[in-house]
Amino acid sequence: MSLQSPSRLLELAGQSLLRKQFLTIFTLDKLPREVFPLMFMEAFSMRRLEVLKLMVQSWPFLRLPLGSLMKTPHLETLQAVLRGLDILVAQKVRPRRWKLQVLDLRDVDESFWTIWTGAKVLSCSPEGMSKRQTVEDCPTMGEHQPLKVFIDLCLKKSTLDECLSYLCGWIHYRRDLVHLCCSKVENYSMPTSSFTNLLERIYPESIQELEVWQKSSLNKTGKFAPYLSQMSNLCKLFLAFGYDRELYMSGQWQFTPDLDSPFLCLSYPQMLYIRKISNIKEHLEHLLRCLKNPLVAFTFCDAYLTDRDMECLSQYPSLSQLKELRLTHILMWTTNLEPLGVLLEKVAATLKILILEDCRIQDPQLRVLLPALSCCSQLTTFYFRGNETSTNALKDLLRHTGRLSKLGLELYPAPLESLDNRGHVNWEIFAPVRAELMCTLREVRQPKRIFFGPAPCPTCGSWPSENVDFHLCS
């Protein structure tokens, strides 16, 4: 007779109890806590909804990670679990055994279930255990503090699905007893009015990342200001209005402002991303003045910068510690770039990424920037494609990068002499010019990854990347 493993014995015991029709709260209160996960999984797979409702009322753990078990939302199962919680949260004196503090509907903790089956999983590591015990997910709760329901929201339709709609309705009538907590909220399609109604149901201090895409006017952002002021733990904010979501720029702590909204005075953004804002010249100075903390990254694209705008970039402390500066698709061929040179001098000790791409920068403007550029000793990435510069100007640029030993990826345009009357590269002319540019560069330093000319390459189709050391197609 073979010996059964402890986990198998618990599984058999749970299955035996599930087969009995008289399972009650009294019976569950007498069971060891180790039986609960296996019984719950069995009842879940068999859709024993009444059993699930009873088990929730006697759940002996701090968290019930239902989301990692219910990969696909199932309304009847969710209803059964919430009906079980209804009985508990309505009681002024909670049962002695009840320890449940968090119902987690996120798919983040599959390890909770697998450790009870005897499976050898990576989530039993210290890292996996710490995830289950984080203060963020399981905050300390007093006897009468609200139950927390955790969920991440990614809204890709104009209306809520049936499970989320039911959950929001259930929480709405139990506001003092249950908090809906969402560390991450993304809205791609829900109308502003419906979305603000949803925000009213979410415990504001739980929101750490908020991302909103709306095909509407910038003045819509003002409607979010009252909610933003309550999100004391918000560390990533991205509000984009009036353009397609495919234009999203990834990164942390992003902020696209409504330039007239009350939340301009927020001081926490570390990355400012501005795109396609036609009236920026009226507000950029005000915006930079309102930012109380230094930015880590500043991105400006698909817009027009006047000489006054350029002066603003060089004057305000909020841009004095930049690690990333990205100016793309901005027509600068008539702009005075001396203030940009001043800004580069200020951030020379911190700047790691400099993107001046598709800006139509010409030879005289480039030469204004060279002294400051040569001081950016921490620079690792430099994009200069899409500018109208000659071979001699590019040679000067390459010579001024001699001290930039940390440069790992460089992108440069084909010089004007190698372009035909349609602006396309003449490869017969460009090949020797590129070789000449490489020789000029090697006189001052040895490049790592460098790319000359258009991208993708019309010959081989390659893009600049870590896998391309040199671009030498002909």
Image (cartoon, grey):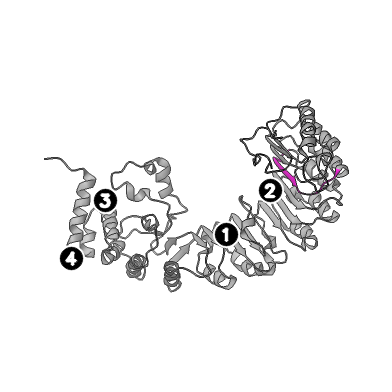
- Contact flag, marks 2 and 3 (Cβ < 8 Å): no
Q: Is residue 232 something that shows in the picture? A: no
The Cα atoms of the two marked residues, 4 and 3, are separated by 21 Å
- Determine the image quadrant of residue 347: top right
> Residue 371 in the image: x percent, y percent?
83, 37
The amino acid type of the residue labelled 2 equals Ala
| Residue at the (21%, 65%) spot, across then down | 24
Badge number at residue 382: none
The local secondary structure at tag 4 comes to loop
Looking at marks 3 and 1 on the same chain, the residue that comes earlier in the sequence is marked by: 3
| Residue at the (56%, 56%) spot, across then down | 209
> Residue 303 in the image: x percent, y percent?
76, 57
Badge number at residue 21: 4
- Determine the image quadrant of residue 30: bottom left
Question: Up-down: is 471 above or below 289?
Answer: above
Badge number at residue 210: 1
From the viewer's perspective, tell me whether residue 137 is left or right of residue 265. left
The amino acid type of the residue labelled 4 equals Gln
Tell me the residue that label 3 is attached to: 34
